[in-house]
Amino acid sequence: MTDIPGHLPHRYPFLLVDRIIEREPGLRVVAEKLVTAGEPHLQGHFPDRPLVPGVLLLEMLAQAAGFLEADALHGRAVFLAGVQDARFKAPALPGDRLRMEVALEGAFGGVMKVRGTVTCEGREVCAASLMVKRP
Amino acid sequence: MTDLKQRVKEMIIDRLKLEGMTPDQIEDQAPLFGEGLGLDSIDALELVLGIEQVFGVKIEDEASGTKAFRSVEALTAFIAEHAKA
Protein backbone atom coordinates (compact mmCIF):
# COMPACT_ATOMS: atom_id res chain seq x y z
CA MET A 1 0.00 0.00 0.00
CA THR A 2 1.43 3.32 -1.08
CA ASP A 3 1.18 6.31 1.27
CA ILE A 4 -0.70 8.67 -1.05
CA PRO A 5 -0.65 11.93 1.01
CA GLY A 6 2.97 11.08 1.79
CA HIS A 7 3.78 11.17 -1.91
CA LEU A 8 1.54 13.84 -3.44
CA PRO A 9 1.24 17.39 -2.04
CA HIS A 10 -2.43 17.63 -3.11
CA ARG A 11 -5.14 17.68 -0.44
CA TYR A 12 -8.93 17.62 -0.12
CA PRO A 13 -10.82 18.58 -2.21
CA PHE A 14 -8.17 18.21 -4.86
CA LEU A 15 -6.49 14.93 -4.00
CA LEU A 16 -7.91 12.73 -6.76
CA VAL A 17 -6.09 9.45 -6.18
CA ASP A 18 -7.47 7.02 -3.58
CA ARG A 19 -5.37 3.94 -4.12
CA ILE A 20 -2.31 2.74 -5.99
CA ILE A 21 -2.86 -0.73 -7.47
CA GLU A 22 0.38 -1.23 -9.40
CA ARG A 23 3.49 0.88 -9.52
CA GLU A 24 6.72 0.57 -11.45
CA PRO A 25 8.51 3.93 -11.05
CA GLY A 26 9.61 5.30 -14.41
CA LEU A 27 7.41 2.85 -16.32
CA ARG A 28 3.76 2.58 -15.36
CA VAL A 29 1.22 3.23 -12.64
CA VAL A 30 -2.29 1.92 -12.08
CA ALA A 31 -4.37 3.91 -9.60
CA GLU A 32 -7.97 4.12 -8.44
CA LYS A 33 -10.39 6.86 -7.55
CA LEU A 34 -13.86 6.27 -6.14
CA VAL A 35 -16.40 8.89 -7.19
CA THR A 36 -18.95 9.91 -4.55
CA ALA A 37 -21.94 12.26 -4.78
CA GLY A 38 -20.60 14.33 -1.86
CA GLU A 39 -17.63 15.74 -3.78
CA PRO A 40 -17.78 19.54 -3.94
CA HIS A 41 -17.32 19.94 -7.70
CA LEU A 42 -20.28 17.64 -8.36
CA GLN A 43 -22.65 19.95 -6.47
CA GLY A 44 -22.72 22.36 -9.37
CA HIS A 45 -21.66 20.05 -12.21
CA PHE A 46 -24.56 19.51 -12.47
CA PRO A 47 -27.22 20.07 -9.75
CA ASP A 48 -29.61 17.52 -11.22
CA ARG A 49 -27.07 15.31 -12.91
CA PRO A 50 -23.73 14.89 -11.13
CA LEU A 51 -20.97 14.22 -13.67
CA VAL A 52 -17.20 14.31 -13.15
CA PRO A 53 -15.79 17.23 -15.21
CA GLY A 54 -13.49 16.15 -18.04
CA VAL A 55 -10.68 18.39 -16.80
CA LEU A 56 -10.72 16.51 -13.50
CA LEU A 57 -10.29 13.21 -15.34
CA LEU A 58 -7.14 14.72 -16.87
CA GLU A 59 -6.04 15.89 -13.41
CA MET A 60 -6.55 12.33 -12.09
CA LEU A 61 -4.20 11.06 -14.78
CA ALA A 62 -1.67 13.79 -13.97
CA GLN A 63 -1.77 12.92 -10.25
CA ALA A 64 -1.40 9.22 -11.08
CA ALA A 65 1.61 10.17 -13.23
CA GLY A 66 3.16 11.74 -10.12
CA PHE A 67 3.67 8.19 -8.85
CA LEU A 68 6.00 7.46 -11.76
CA GLU A 69 8.52 9.46 -9.76
CA ALA A 70 10.30 7.20 -7.30
CA ASP A 71 10.56 9.85 -4.58
CA ALA A 72 7.85 11.83 -2.79
CA LEU A 73 6.93 15.08 -4.49
CA HIS A 74 6.61 17.24 -1.37
CA GLY A 75 8.35 20.56 -1.69
CA ARG A 76 9.05 19.93 -5.33
CA ALA A 77 6.90 21.39 -8.04
CA VAL A 78 5.48 19.13 -10.71
CA PHE A 79 3.43 20.88 -13.35
CA LEU A 80 1.06 19.77 -16.03
CA ALA A 81 2.75 21.18 -19.14
CA GLY A 82 0.60 19.86 -21.96
CA VAL A 83 -2.37 17.74 -22.97
CA GLN A 84 -2.67 16.03 -26.36
CA ASP A 85 -5.32 13.97 -28.08
CA ALA A 86 -7.73 14.00 -25.14
CA ARG A 87 -10.95 12.08 -25.67
CA PHE A 88 -13.87 11.76 -23.29
CA LYS A 89 -15.85 8.70 -24.26
CA ALA A 90 -18.26 7.99 -21.44
CA PRO A 91 -19.49 9.88 -18.36
CA ALA A 92 -17.96 9.25 -14.92
CA LEU A 93 -20.68 9.24 -12.29
CA PRO A 94 -21.07 8.95 -8.50
CA GLY A 95 -20.49 5.33 -7.49
CA ASP A 96 -17.96 4.72 -10.24
CA ARG A 97 -14.67 3.08 -9.39
CA LEU A 98 -12.30 4.76 -11.83
CA ARG A 99 -9.09 3.05 -12.85
CA MET A 100 -6.32 5.36 -14.04
CA GLU A 101 -3.48 3.78 -16.00
CA VAL A 102 -0.46 5.82 -17.07
CA ALA A 103 2.58 4.59 -18.99
CA LEU A 104 5.73 6.54 -19.76
CA GLU A 105 6.30 7.27 -23.46
CA GLY A 106 9.50 9.21 -23.05
CA ALA A 107 11.36 11.84 -21.08
CA PHE A 108 13.83 14.51 -22.06
CA GLY A 109 15.09 17.75 -20.57
CA GLY A 110 12.95 17.56 -17.44
CA VAL A 111 9.70 16.87 -19.29
CA MET A 112 8.00 13.51 -19.41
CA LYS A 113 5.24 12.34 -21.71
CA VAL A 114 2.75 9.74 -20.57
CA ARG A 115 -0.16 7.98 -22.22
CA GLY A 116 -3.10 7.66 -19.87
CA THR A 117 -6.51 6.06 -19.81
CA VAL A 118 -9.36 6.21 -17.32
CA THR A 119 -11.65 3.21 -17.36
CA CYS A 120 -14.59 2.04 -15.28
CA GLU A 121 -15.40 -1.68 -15.20
CA GLY A 122 -13.67 -2.12 -18.54
CA ARG A 123 -15.39 0.77 -20.31
CA GLU A 124 -13.15 3.57 -21.50
CA VAL A 125 -14.02 6.91 -19.95
CA CYS A 126 -11.08 9.07 -21.00
CA ALA A 127 -7.83 8.75 -22.93
CA ALA A 128 -5.11 11.39 -23.29
CA SER A 129 -1.40 12.04 -23.57
CA LEU A 130 0.02 14.35 -20.91
CA MET A 131 3.26 16.25 -20.73
CA VAL A 132 4.47 16.74 -17.17
CA LYS A 133 7.32 19.00 -16.13
CA ARG A 134 9.42 17.03 -13.68
CA PRO A 135 11.01 18.34 -10.48
CA MET B 1 22.24 13.98 -47.08
CA THR B 2 19.97 16.52 -48.79
CA ASP B 3 17.26 13.90 -48.92
CA LEU B 4 17.71 13.08 -45.23
CA LYS B 5 17.60 16.79 -44.39
CA GLN B 6 14.28 17.04 -46.21
CA ARG B 7 12.90 14.07 -44.25
CA VAL B 8 14.11 15.63 -40.98
CA LYS B 9 12.25 18.83 -41.82
CA GLU B 10 9.12 16.87 -42.72
CA MET B 11 9.34 14.98 -39.43
CA ILE B 12 9.66 18.26 -37.48
CA ILE B 13 6.61 19.76 -39.21
CA ASP B 14 4.58 16.59 -38.80
CA ARG B 15 5.52 15.87 -35.19
CA LEU B 16 5.12 19.43 -33.93
CA LYS B 17 2.01 20.04 -36.05
CA LEU B 18 3.53 23.19 -37.59
CA GLU B 19 0.51 23.59 -39.80
CA GLY B 20 0.94 25.70 -42.91
CA MET B 21 4.72 25.39 -42.77
CA THR B 22 6.68 23.80 -45.61
CA PRO B 23 10.15 22.18 -45.40
CA ASP B 24 11.78 24.95 -47.45
CA GLN B 25 10.60 27.52 -44.90
CA ILE B 26 12.89 25.95 -42.29
CA GLU B 27 16.43 27.22 -42.70
CA ASP B 28 19.22 24.66 -42.46
CA GLN B 29 21.31 26.77 -40.10
CA ALA B 30 18.60 28.39 -37.97
CA PRO B 31 18.51 27.35 -34.31
CA LEU B 32 15.52 25.13 -33.47
CA PHE B 33 15.04 26.60 -30.01
CA GLY B 34 14.80 30.16 -28.78
CA GLU B 35 15.32 32.27 -31.88
CA GLY B 36 14.82 30.52 -35.21
CA LEU B 37 11.92 28.07 -34.98
CA GLY B 38 11.27 29.12 -31.38
CA LEU B 39 10.65 25.65 -29.97
CA ASP B 40 10.34 24.93 -26.23
CA SER B 41 11.17 22.06 -23.87
CA ILE B 42 7.91 20.24 -24.64
CA ASP B 43 8.71 20.39 -28.36
CA ALA B 44 12.16 18.99 -27.56
CA LEU B 45 10.61 15.87 -26.02
CA GLU B 46 8.29 15.51 -29.02
CA LEU B 47 11.28 15.70 -31.35
CA VAL B 48 13.21 13.12 -29.31
CA LEU B 49 10.23 10.74 -29.63
CA GLY B 50 9.79 11.55 -33.35
CA ILE B 51 13.48 10.98 -34.16
CA GLU B 52 13.34 7.61 -32.41
CA GLN B 53 10.15 6.58 -34.19
CA VAL B 54 11.02 7.78 -37.70
CA PHE B 55 14.79 7.29 -37.84
CA GLY B 56 15.40 4.73 -35.09
CA VAL B 57 17.92 7.02 -33.41
CA LYS B 58 17.85 7.55 -29.66
CA ILE B 59 18.90 10.80 -28.03
CA GLU B 60 19.88 9.50 -24.64
CA ASP B 61 20.91 12.57 -22.70
CA GLU B 62 20.59 16.32 -22.70
CA ALA B 63 24.19 16.86 -23.76
CA SER B 64 23.73 15.05 -27.08
CA GLY B 65 20.30 16.69 -27.43
CA THR B 66 21.76 20.17 -27.04
CA LYS B 67 24.28 19.35 -29.74
CA ALA B 68 21.76 17.74 -32.11
CA PHE B 69 19.16 20.49 -31.73
CA ARG B 70 21.49 23.35 -32.69
CA SER B 71 20.03 23.41 -36.20
CA VAL B 72 18.42 21.19 -38.83
CA GLU B 73 21.88 20.67 -40.30
CA ALA B 74 23.29 19.55 -36.94
CA LEU B 75 20.30 17.28 -36.36
CA THR B 76 20.64 15.70 -39.82
CA ALA B 77 24.33 15.04 -39.20
CA PHE B 78 23.52 13.54 -35.78
CA ILE B 79 20.92 11.19 -37.28
CA ALA B 80 23.19 10.19 -40.18
CA GLU B 81 26.00 9.39 -37.75
CA HIS B 82 23.93 7.37 -35.31
CA ALA B 83 21.69 5.55 -37.80
CA LYS B 84 24.66 3.73 -39.33
CA ALA B 85 24.91 1.01 -36.71
Image: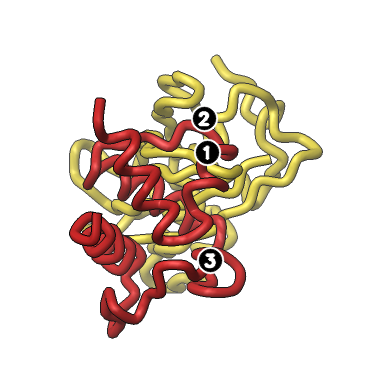
- Give, as a three-letter code, the residue at label 2: Leu
Chain of the residue on which disc 3 is drawn: B
Drawn side of residue A101 relative to residue B41, left or right:
left
Drawn side of residue A52 relative to residue B82, left or right:
right
- The x and y percentages for residue B65 are 51, 44
Residue A114 seen in the current view: yes
Q: Mark 1 points at which residue?
A: B64
Residue A100 seen in the current view: no
Cα separation, mark 2 vs mark 1, equals 25 Å
Q: Mark 2 points at which residue?
A: A68
Crowding at dot 1, Cα within 10 Å, few <14 / some 14-19 / many 20+, comes out as: few
Helix, strand or loop for disc 3: loop
The C terminus of chain B is located in which quarter?
top left
- Give, as a three-letter code, the residue at label 1: Ser
- The x and y percentages for residue A129 are 36, 52
Q: Marks 1 and 3: same chain?
A: yes
Q: Name the residue under label 3.
A: B31
Chain of the residue on which disc 2 is drawn: A
Label 3 with label 2: CB-CB less than 8 Å: no
